[in-house]
Image: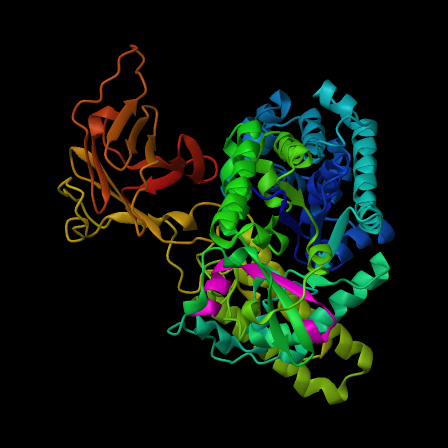
Amino acid sequence: MSSEPLRVAFLWHQHQPYYKEGNSYLLPWARLHATKDYYDMAAALEPFDRLKQTINVVPSLLIQLIDYVEHGATDVVLDLSRLPADRLTAAEKLTMLRYFFLCNVERMVLPYPRYRELYERGGNGNRNDEAALAAARDRFADQDWRDLQVWYNLTWIGEYSRAEEPFASLLAKGRDFTEDEKHALLEASMMIVARVIPTYRAMMESGRIELSITPFYHPILPLLCDSQSATEALPDIKLPATRIMWPEDARVQVERAVALFEERFGRRPSGMWPSEGSVSDATLEIIRDCGLSWVATDEEILRRSLGDRSHHLAKYFPWSLDTASGPVWVLFRDHMLSDAIGFVYSSWKPEDAAADFYHRLVEIRNHLIQELGPESLAEAIVPVILDGENCWEYYQDNGRPFLESLYSLLSESNEIVATTIGGELSRHTPSPERTLDRIVAGSWIGANFKIWIGHDEDNAAWDALAAARSALMAARDRLGEAAFTEAMEEIYIAEGSDWYWWFGDDNTAANQEDFDRLFRYHLRRVYELIAEPVPAMLASPIRGVKTAPAVSVPERSITPQIDGRRSDHEWHGAGSFIVDRVGGTMHRADVFERRVFFGSDDRNLYLRYDTSMPLAPTETVRLQVAMARSIVVQFRSSSVAVEATAGADGLVSIAGIAAAIGESLEAAIPLSLIGNGALDAFGLVCEISEEGHVTERFPLQGAIECRLRP
């Protein structure tokens, strides 16, 4: 067996869109993720001298951190937190109830008795029921509001700062905070924000990390160069009425990212994680011409680009692509490994998750040796690329036990070594056998651009952007340079991917309306700066353009046969939802559609689960009807298990439940087992497990409300 280690290249992507509206930030995520995640990602690595990593910093995040630290920027949550609790207005209190529970409730609220008490008294995080919010507001005394101000900011303090003061004392005290204690917390939290950029620079200069970049405002570069590129993966996709062809904007987004990086970190970056791993031939030409030597994207892009040349181990090597400015290296993320950290391990014991990840790396090393020979290890790199922020709030202690367990295993290993991407590529020379003729346009999600273009809402947003940009260009000759530059900045901001991420029905979140509002704000600013009338359509939300509800209501009673056959006529008129559209804010790379149907007659509640992928022998699908009496139907490839909660008398009855495994997973549950009387609605939870470990849960917390009647 070769003694050569396998190189693994972690890239943690740190990203926030530009949240500024007027003179402050509408959303606080740049600041709060800085106190909880951005500093912690560096602090977690610091004790492990043998490990090196790449951290990708998005300029739209950097300029917000700079704004907070150097210019005293503020945001809605920070402003509300600073106000004396006994002087809050009724409107400010309602805003607090909408914003101060926006976090992972299971990990960041419920473990703290006082915060949990405030959450339950404050309406359990319901942001949209005005009457319930008003009632909850009236239940709070001044001390409750002050404790809520403290707890929301305190729960966003990262694990590596909590031993410091004043955080340790506040966590120990738990309640009845004073105004002085609150302000000490806010001041200390801003000191964490101030550490992030200097810490990253120091670790880069010492060789512990490499820093890479993304285009300035995080646009999907291939769509900016030519929206028609979306048809490479989806030939029948419906595109906006206006064809987007702005390669000059794409170039500015890359050039400005490089310039800001050099200004803040004292050197030019060598590599880039393009926004959402989105690539095309045209964008790689621009990236290479701007002086960057490597990019990274997803393994499915490599498979499609290679075609008949594809091999299942090809993703573990860097590939080069020739451009007019020279060759550019392209790495392809292992999406199973990356998604395991992003979506799977949060519910595991940290030590088990770390061991599983490490053993997967060892297996990759063994496969390379067995199939390509031990000499292949000298060239192999396993890219693990994911967000360095969003997943951690689903982990125990914000991911600290998992990361420390994993880093310990890697530090002690002779078989695996963690390296930076640029540092590793400096050893490589392009070779004909690993040179791409072209790269197929796509992103890390489904190897296409469906999330950002094609839906009626997405297309309406692109057309609104195109109209604003056209109006600006028509007015250019009569504008002063300063006015044109300021208006063009608004265009660049509106080109960011995040606005389109939240349009359409691909993703759901509690504050989607805020993203819609910000997008339209930036376009309105263009018209205001060029002294043109603002189009009426920018006064109303874009969300809602021909959009169906995420969970449809049954149109009629159904009585299907429970036989596992995909008999759509028997389920005609049933309610349904696509699983991934009710799940949360994050996406996996291996996207395939899963749909749940539901309905009832006068005797039974009926459930059906469809997936385009058959159940693996080690996979379990668990459907839970979450009512006062909970019923769970658990499907495996060749067996079904049923469990039920006991009633007040301590008795359990599961007689009468029918279930079947086949083309579909189906179940019929007697209404008498769920509750008394007519059933108007029920809660549903879907969990998917592999070898006893939960890998997915829909929704991420709580239950999906399924209404049986309008």
Depicted 428 relative to depicted 419: above or below: below
Depicted 147 relative to depicted 456: above or below: above
User: Total marks drawn?
Assistant: 0
Q: Nearer the viewer, residue 241 or 228?
A: 228
Q: Where residue 409 appears, x then y in whole percent?
A: 63, 33
In the image as oriented, which residue stretches furthest toward the top?
649
- Residue 256 picture quarter: bottom right
292 inside magenta stretch? yes
Q: Where residue 375 appears, x then y in whole percent?
A: 59, 53
622 inside magenta stretch? no
Residue at horizontal 39%, vertical 40%? 704
Depicted 393 relative to depicted 69: above or below: above
Does residue 198 appear to the left or right of 616 in the view shown? Answer: right
Does residue 704 appear to the left or right of 150 in the view shown? Answer: left
Residue at horizontal 58%, vertical 67%? 220
In the image as oriented, which residue stretches furthest toward the front?
1
| Residue range (magenta) | 287-307
| Image quadrant containing the N terminus | top right
For the rendered model, the colour scheme is rainbow
Q: Nearer the viewer, residue 139 or 198?
A: 198
Residue 188 visible (yes or no): yes
Residue at horizontal 81%, vertical 77%? 482
Q: Where residue 216 appears, x then y in whole percent?
A: 70, 65
Residue at horizontal 84%, vertical 51%? 205
- Residue 288 picture quarter: bottom right
Residue 339 visible (yes or no): no
Q: Where residue 361 appears, x then y in whole percent?
A: 55, 42
In the image as oriented, which residue stretches furthest toward the bottom?
477
- Residue 629 picture quarter: top left
